[in-house]
Amino acid sequence: MQRKEKALELFGNRCNCSQAVFAAFRQAEVLDEASALRLATVFGGGVAGSGGEMCGAVTGALMALSMRYDMGGIGELANKKRTYELGRQFMEEFEKRMGSCRCESMLGLCIGEQENLQKARELKLFETVCVDAVGTASDILEEMLGAEVS
C-alpha cells in the first residue's frame, strides 16, 4: 500500500491529520504505528485542537522528515541544518498548494472554539479541506522521500 493511501485510510478511520501523515510516513523499522499515533496526537487540530496554529498534516510531515534526516545523537549535529532546509522546502511547497500551513487560514475559522468546531463539521471541512491537506502533505512527502510503506 502506498503511504498516501495509508495516510488517507488512517484519517478516514478517525485519526487526526498529524497522526495520519506521521504514522504513514514514519520509518517503520524504527517506530511502530501505535507509538507514532501516540506521538503525533497532540499536533492535530491546529496543535492540541487549538485550531489556530500549524496544520496537523504539516506537523506530521515535518516529524516524518525529522525522523528520516535529523540527528539521532550529538555526533549527528550536521543533520540538523539539512533537516531544517527540508522542512522549509516542505512548508513552502505545502503553502503553495494549499494556500497556508495554518489550520485556521486553511479552514477559514478557528476550530479551537466549540461553535466553530461544530460549524466545520456541518460544512464538512474535515472531509474536504482536511482530506486535501493530508493528501497534499502525502504527495509532497512522496516526492521528497519516495517508496512504499512496509
Image (cartoon, grey):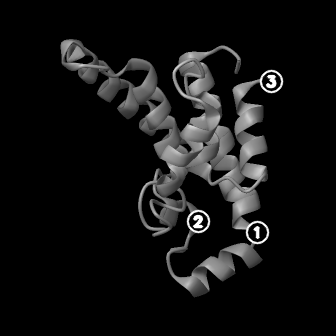
- For the residue pair 89 and 134, the one nearer the viewer reads as 134
Helix or strand or loop: what does disc 1 sit on? loop
- In the image, residue 76 sits, relative to residue 43, either above or below, namely above
Vertical position of residue 25 compared to residue 77: above or below: below
Please tell me how many numbered marks the rendered image carries.
3
The structure residue drawn at horizontal position 54% and vertical position 27%, both measured from the top left corner, is 31
The residue at the point 39 percent across, 32 percent down is 87
Q: Position of residue 78 (x, y in %)?
A: 21, 14
Q: CA distance from mark 3 to mark 1?
A: 27 Å
First in sequence: mark 3 vs mark 1 = 3
Which disc number belongs to residue 107?
Answer: 2
Q: Position of residue 109 (x, y in %)?
A: 54, 74
Q: Residues within 10 Å of mark 2 (few under 14, many from 20)?
A: some
Dot 3: few (<14), some (14–19), or many (≥20) neighbours within 10 Å? few
Q: Position of residue 62 (x, y in %)?
A: 44, 36
Residue found 76% across the figure and 24% down from its top: 2
Residue 50 placement: quadrant: bottom left
Mark whose residue sits in front, 3 or 1: 3
Identify which amino acid the numbered label 2 is placed on.
Answer: Leu
Residue designated by label 3? 1
Residue 16 visible from this viewpoint:
yes
**Mark 1 and mark 2 residues within 8 Å of each other at the beta carbon:** no
Question: Which callout, 1 or 2, points at the residue further toward the start of the chain?
Answer: 2
The disc at residue 150 is none
Q: Give coordinates of residue 84: x percent, y percent.
A: 30, 29
Do the residues bearing badges 3 and 1 touch, measured as CB atoms within 8 Å?
Answer: no
Relative to 145, residue 119 above or below: below
Can you identify the residue that label 1 sits on?
124
Q: Quadrant of the C terminus?
A: top right
User: What element does badge 3 sit on?
Assistant: loop
> Reading the chain from its start, which is encountered first: label 3 or label 2?
3
Above or below, comparing residue 124 to residue 75 in the picture: below
